[in-house]
Image (cartoon, grey):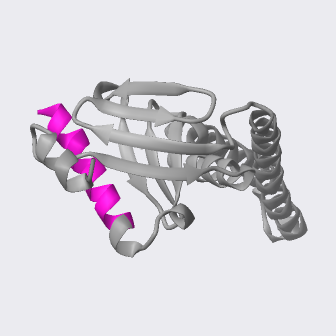
Amino acid sequence: MSNDARRSACGKGVGVVEVTYRNKLVDSVRVTGWMMFHSWLYGTPLIVLALIVTQVTWRAASGGPALLPFKIFAAVVFVVAQLAVIIALLLAVVTLAYGLSRTRGVYTEHTLTADEEGLTESTDVNTTTFKWEAVTKIVRTKRYLLIFLGSLRAHIIPRRDVRDQAQWDSTFQQLQELLAASRT
């Protein structure tokens, strides 16, 4: 069935969106890194830890100009602590993503079909349908289209697997319209 035929068959006129893509390990790592800084669940602990480390080191160094070397040391400790937290989180992400790579169906070809009923993801090992109520948001970054199912789970559609900019824009717009139509 052509996309026009699917569009006219859809009661709300938005149509059916179908995208075929393949995720790679690098996609999981990049998106998890992105989520670390855009999700309250990941971002809040980082901010709290940074504030604690800043307060502890700065208060320890508060005093007169005689403590300037200690203040410089405190600033270095702060930067090293920040880097250590980021590196630790990234290592955790890579370990998790590597574990996922061993799961058949994660890094294989996916076909995602969206219509007024919801999203259907098909791979060579499974087919799963999600109603629109399960979708919390749809986000487009420079490299990915992310369809969130809760705060930590998302379908990751890489930009590289979409034919051209017009299709990329159209896919995002149609998905947004389908989500909005489901909310009314």
175 or 57: nearer the eye? 175
The x, y position of residue 13, in whole percent, is 11, 46
Position of the C terminus, as image quadrant, is: top left
What kind of secondary structure does the magenta stretch mostly adopt? helix
65 or 79: nearer the eye? 79
The residue at the point 19 percent across, 55 percent down is: 4
Q: Is residue 56 above or below residue 58?
A: above
The x, y position of residue 136, in whole percent, is 36, 34
89 or 142: nearer the eye? 142
Whether residue 14 can be seen here: no
182 relative to 168 in the view: left or right:
left
In which quadrant of the rendered view does residue 130 lie? top left
The residue at the point 81 percent across, 71 percent down is: 65
17 relative to 57 in the view: left or right:
left
The residue furthest front is 1
In which quadrant of the rendered view does residue 42 lie? top right
The x, y position of residue 74, in whole percent, is 83, 58
User: Magenta includes 171?
Assistant: yes
Q: Is residue 163 above or below residue 14?
A: below
53 relative to 180 in the view: left or right:
right
Whether residue 179 can be seen here: yes
The x, y position of residue 85, in whole percent, is 78, 47
Q: Which residues are magenta?
A: 168-184
